[in-house]
Amino acid sequence: MIETKNINFYYGNFHALKDISMKMEKNTVTALIGPSGCGKSTFLRLFNRMNDLIDDTRLTGACLINNENIYQKNVRVDALRKRVGMVFQKPNPFPKSIFENVAYGLRVNDMGDKNYIKETVEQSLINAALWDEVKDKLNKSAFELSGGQQQRLCIARALAVNPEVLLMDEPASALDPISTSKIEELIHDLKKDYTIVIVTHNMQQAARVSDRTAFFMLGELVEYNDTKKIFLNPDIEQTQNYITGRFG
Amino acid sequence: MTKKSINEKVAFLIFRVLGIVVIGILFWILGFIIYNGIGVISWEFLTTEPTEGMTAGGIFPAIMGTLTLVLGSMVVAFPLGVMSAIYTQEYAGKGWTVRFIRVMTSNLASIPSIVFGLFGMALFVNKLGFGDSIIAGSLTLSLLVLPVVIRTTEEALKAIPNSYRTGSYALGATKLQTIRKVILPMAMPNIFTGLILSIGRVSGETAPILFTVAAYFLPKLPSSIFDQVMALPYHLYVLATSGANMEQTRPIAYGTALVLIAIVLMMNLLASLIRRKMNKKLKMQ
């Protein structure tokens, strides 16, 4: 489904990702863990080419989604980002109504007529486990929602354009424990329809939500394996040290 | 009392006095104009033409002239300024061209308005052959306020957190869609501040319209954009310096000043109301 081949990434002279090759299967949740600055967020942003927005960066190697190199010249970045959705660390709903937030992606991508948009908005909110809380106030501003609700709205917004992959950059780090557990449940439910890659600082969260875990350090992929294996019996000592909290 | 708290008291006393002085000056000017000008204000004064060598009658053509020039210059300066700011802020990146454009914009803002007047006369009136006309005057005024519009729009765009841009891109929106559907609506209330400032500036300027549009005495309304008009600031200047009978025209001059101030204040108020409404709609505050 997703495959990287010898990815190297540079911010100016800083070598942020070093020769990363890994594969992620369809309908799995992959957690990227590691200390701050290890490159896991940079790695995540490769898949929807968000790093393109940063000046003075350079990439070598290949990044394949469904066997298509997304860094080829003829790839349209906006079309790619429709296929690869993203949820950010801080909820960032637009200053529009709840309905319009979810409809936004459908509108900018010219997807369907009024009825289709209405149905898709409803379905996306249901899938993001937010429908029951907002169905009576779809025309209210998204800013009236709580932080956790806003984050689920952002997930609904991403789901609406029907992506294949969902990238999550510490989606629960700005939320309280109850909202966090709702997001985690949601990730579990979404797995059957989407391939999910999640960056997290929270070790327990990685253990709870993911099937596979990749441990990054200083721009290198140290260990990548089934989550159970990584947390119970990692092959490499650094991984062991990190997950047991001896550093990082 | 400790030395620290005395210092504190003295400093704030000075700040307060200075603040009151500034507001006092403003109210003094306003009071002076109102006191001297209110006597001539009447429905006739606002809706009729000057008569008897401008010693009697109203200032209707000058009011309409100023409103026309405000509208004309805004129609040109607002879209042009906003689009330039979008270019420099959202598209152009950080290279030396953008820095050069910024410096030049600041320079444009510091050019004396009489120089704009001369330039407008040379280019629009003579070279392009518009003659003394609304279009020449509006274009000259729009050049004058362009830097204000550009600068405030840039600041408004800069104030929008990047997370809204990335959020939009992440859904497959293009840059243009992001700007049109997310960034501009969010920036609009602050862009409006620039518009308010510009309107105040344009309605009060005399020098740029002196050689490009303003008529000394023209007791009828224009029929096309190639006509001359009277304008309040220039009318005021004429009444105060070169009227046929200065003693007789003095109250009319004060009345004209009062109307000019009232128009600017009303436009500011209207723009603030619209701005408030936009902000409310965005639920930003």
Image (tube, rainbow, N blue to C red):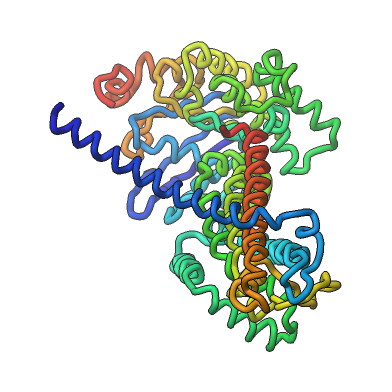
Question: Along the horizontal axis of the image, is A29 left or right of A115?
Answer: left
Task: Classify residue A224 by image quadrant.
Answer: top left
Instruction: Pick the quarter of the image with the C terminus of chain B.
Output: top right
Q: Residue furthest bottom?
A: B127
Q: Is residue B137 above or below residue B188?
A: below
Q: Is residue B138 above or below residue B11?
A: below
- Tally the numbered discs: 0
Give x and y (percent) for residue B10. 23, 38
Question: Along the horizontal axis of the image, is B225 left or right of B251?
Answer: right
Which residue lies at the image location 64% right of the left edge and 63% below the top edge?
B251
Q: Is residue B93 above or below residue A26?
A: below
Q: Residue furthest front?
A: B247
Residue A240 visible in the snapshot: yes
Q: Nearer the viewer, residue A37 or B195?
A: B195
Which residue lies at the image location 61% right of the left edge and 42% below the top edge?
B186
Q: Nearer the viewer, residue B120 or A35?
A: B120
Give x and y (percent) for residue A70. 59, 47
Which residue lies at the image location 80% right of the left edge and 73% below the top edge?
B219
Q: Is residue B24 above or below residue A151?
A: below
Instruction: Pick the quarter of the image with the N terminus of chain B.
Output: top left
Give x and y (percent) for residue B112. 50, 74
Give x and y (percent) for residue B258. 63, 57
Task: Classify residue A144 by image quadrant.
Answer: top right
Residue A76 visible in the snapshot: no
Which residue lies at the image location 60% right of the left edge and 17% below the top edge?
A186
